[in-house]
Amino acid sequence: MPKLLPVAEPLSLCCSPLTSQPLSAEQAETVAPLLKALADPVRLRLMSLIASHADGEACVCDLTPAFELSQPTISHHLKVLHDAGLVDRERRGTWVYYRARPQALQSLATLLTAAGATPVTIP
């Protein structure tokens, strides 16, 4: 049986920006799986595609053509994002629709943003 990653809820309750104070060992254990889930280029792109898709949700059938990967591989990456608590999913007939969890993304943004800092554009 696969090990399930912790969901994002504890992150929103535990963490101020990294520049404000050091994370405890427990906080780091909570945050690391979320960052690990996003550290893969395919999963990062999937997260971006889902979050920016019309109505904030995307069917796996909408996501697969963006990659040169099989549908089962895309589904595996989506499962990792779901298990980490970064996306919700809903089955509708034969398709599964994914929606980004705004609270999880906001929690990560808060963690990684220096207090009072101006957002930086990545080149």
Image (cartoon, rainbow, N blue to C red):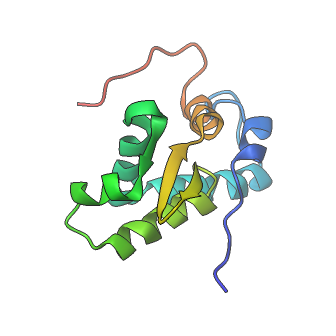
Above or below, comparing residue 22 to residue 96 in the picture: above
Q: Is residue 48 left or right of residue 111?
A: left
Residue 27 falls left or right of residue 56: right
Q: Quadrant of the N terminus?
A: bottom right
Image coordinates for residue 42, horizontal then vertical, percent: 33, 59
Q: Is residue 84 above or below residue 14?
A: below
46 left or right of 110 in image? left
Give residue 100's position: percent from left, percent from top: 53, 42
Res 60 → quadrant = bottom left
Residue 76, image x and y in percent?
45, 71
**Closer to us: 17 or 77:** 77
Please give the name of the residue rendered at 43% of the width and 19% of the height, measured from the top-left corner.
Answer: 119
Comparing 123 with 57, the one in front is 57
Please tell me which residue lies in front, 110 or 93. Answer: 93
The answer to whether 53 is drawn above or below residue 5 in the figure is above
Of residues 27 and 54, the one nearer the viewer is 54
